[in-house]
Structures are given as structure tokens and as C-alpha cells.
């Protein structure tokens, strides 16, 4: 991953979210819209998300050391879990405000023209950041960068729903203001759940899916003179996979040759993007 480039974009995205939070909060206060207030809370969560993700990505990129012989890859899924918990807290606050307005609200929000401009501006900015981060996450396989990209995509849908609610309210249907807020709350809660579910698998050292296992086997067998795979164990260490594999070689091979074959198998397996380390054990037929 181009860490410097991504880091700069992350800082830019953080600043954007601070600005959007302040703009949306001001618009919510002026208009009295619970939908815009919910979107402001969502932007506040983004501020926390970007800060946590930025520092976790930097930590995860550190190599192994004495205290962390397998590296720091667990930092990213831990950050993603923290983001998911924050999403749950934010969604609860949104529900509380939205249902309060839905059942006890007496006033109709007022929307000056600049309120619409703020929402459209937010959607455009989020789309730009999403496009960049989505490309980077696919290239780097970083769960932290992926979390930012997913969050940006969520924000595009959430703010679009708020914009629709605001337009409907202006057309004489004020019930759409709290309904839009409830939609935002549900979306934030659902995406937080998905993020938590995925990253818990990383933290619990689960095995990768069958496609990854098949790719590991294929890469190992592609090395000349490897006659088969005697056993294979793979599990997540953070958001990367550690592999322990046994390969079958001929007893007729010299020690130096078996050593070279083992190293080539290791290299082939570690070429897989999601694999961090491969440990090769040699068995003989």
C-alpha cells in the first residue's frame, strides 16, 4: 500500500468529516430537523472512525518486534470492533431522538436553501473519498482502509435518505423527517454489526474460507518436485493469514535440494495477498 498517500488522504478525510459535522450540526439547530441531526451524529462517528482507523493502520504496518513477534496486524480488527461499538451507541441516540419527534414532536422543521446545499455538498465529498479508499483497500487488503471506504459508502446512502426526507417535509409531509432519521439509525446499526461480525473472525483466529485454502494448496503444489500436501493449517492473525503446511517430497532428494524446495513453497504461498507468514514442514513419501 502507498502508506504516505493513503495517510494523507486519511487526514484529509478526517478534516472533511470535522467540517461536515459542524455544518450539519448548525443546519440541524437552525432547521430543527431530527433527520439532519442524525446525520450530524453520523458524521461525529466518522470523526472517531477516521482517527481510530488512521492510528490502527499505522500500528498494523509496523514489523515484528520483541514484544510482537508476529507483527501488529491485530490492531486493525481491534479498531474495527471499536468502530462497530461506537456505531451501536450512535444509532441508539438517533433512535431516541427520532422516536421522540415521531410520537411527541409538535413543530415542523424549517429548511433554508443552504441546508440543501450542505447535504448535496456532503454527498459529493463522500463519494470522492469513497472512490479513492475503495480502490486502496482492494489493493492493500487493509481492513482499516476498507472500514473507511465502507463508512463513506454508508454516509452517501444515509445523507441521501436525509435529503429525501427534507424534500418530502418541504412538500408537506413532516413525518418523513423522523422516518429519515430512523432509516439512518438502522443503517448505521446494520453496518456496525457487519463490521463487527467480520472482524471478530479475525480476532478469534478463524480459518479462512475454502477459496483461500484452495489457493494455498495450488500454490504449494505448483513448485516442481512437490508430490503432495500431507497436512495444512491456516488461521487469521489479525486480518492476515498464517499458514503451516506439510509437503511431501521424494526420499531420494538431497538435503540441500529439499531445503530449497521448502523455501520456494514458502515464497509461493506468501505471494497470496492475504497470507502473512507460511511455515513449511517437509515429509517424505
Image (spheres, helix red, strand yellow):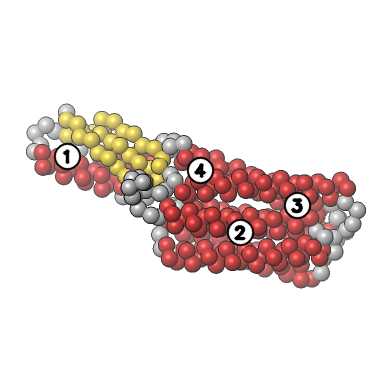
Q: Quick check: 14 left or right of 72? A: right
Q: Residue furthest front?
A: 67
Q: Quadrant of the N terminus?
A: bottom left
From where the camera sits, is residue 187 visible? no
Name the residue that disc number 2 marks. 47
Looking at the image, tell me whether mark 3 or mark 4 is earlier in sequence order: 3
Looking at the image, tell me whether mark 3 or mark 2 is earlier in sequence order: 2
In the structure shown, which secondary structural element does the residue marked by tag 1 occupy? loop
Name the residue that disc number 4 marks. 199
Looking at the image, tell me whether mark 1 or mark 4 is earlier in sequence order: 4
* Residue 127, image quadrant: bottom right
**Image depth: mark 2 or mark 1 in front:** 2
Q: In the image, residue 75 lies at what x, y percent?
A: 46, 49
The numbered dot on residue 225 is: 1
Q: Quick check: 254 left or right of 169? A: left
Name the residue that disc number 3 marks. 181
Amino acid at each position: 500500500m502507498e502508506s504516505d498517500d493513503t495517510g494523507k488522504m486519511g487526514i484529509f478525510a478526517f478534516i472533511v468529516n470535522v467540517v461536515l459535522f459542524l455544518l450539519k450540526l448548525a443546519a440541524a439547530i437552525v432547521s430543527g430537523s431530527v433527520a439532519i441531526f442524525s446525520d450530524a451524529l453520523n458524521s461525529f462517528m466518522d470523526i472517531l472512525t477516521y482517527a481510530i482507523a488512521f492510528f490502527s493502520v499505522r500500528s498494523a504496518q509496523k514489523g515484528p518486534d520483541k514484544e510482537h513477534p508476529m507483527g501488529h496486524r491485530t490492531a486493525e480488527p481491534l479498531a474495527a470492533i471499536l468502530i462497530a461499538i461506537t456505531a451501536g451507541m450512535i444509532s441508539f441516540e438517533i433512535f431516541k431522538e427520532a422516536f421522540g419527534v415521531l410520537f411527541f414532536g409538535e413543530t415542523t422543521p424549517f429548511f433554508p436553501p443552504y441546508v440543501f446545499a450542505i447535504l448535496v455538498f456532503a454527498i459529493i465529498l463522500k463519494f470522492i473519498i469513497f472512490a479513492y479508499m475503495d480502490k486502496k483497500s482492494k489493493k492493500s487488503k487493509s481492513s482499516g482502509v476498507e472500514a473507511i471506504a465502507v463508512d463513506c459508502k454508508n454516509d452517501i446512502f444515509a445523507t441521501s435518505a436525509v435529503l429525501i426526507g427534507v424534500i418530502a417535509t418541504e412538500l408537506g409531509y413532516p413525518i418523513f423527517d423522523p422516518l429519515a432519521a430512523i432509516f439512518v439509525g438502522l443503517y448505521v446499526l446494520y453496518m456496525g454489526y457487519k463490521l463487527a461480525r467480520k472482524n471478530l473472525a479475525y480476532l478469534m483466529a478463524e480459518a479462512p474460507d475454502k477459496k483461500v485454502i484452495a489457493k494455498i494448496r495450488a500454490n504449494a503444489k505448483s513448485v516442481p518436485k512437490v508430490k503432495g500436501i500431507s497436512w495444512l493449517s491456516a488461521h487469521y492473525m489479525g486480518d492476515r493469514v498464517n499458514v503451516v503446511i506439510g509437503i511431501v517430497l521424494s526420499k531420494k532428494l538431497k538435503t540441500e535440494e529439499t531445503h530449497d524446495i521448502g523455501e520456494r513453497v514458502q515464497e509461493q504461498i506468501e505471494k497470496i495477498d492475504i497470507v502473512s507468514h507460511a511455515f513449511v514442514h517437509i515429509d517424505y513419501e
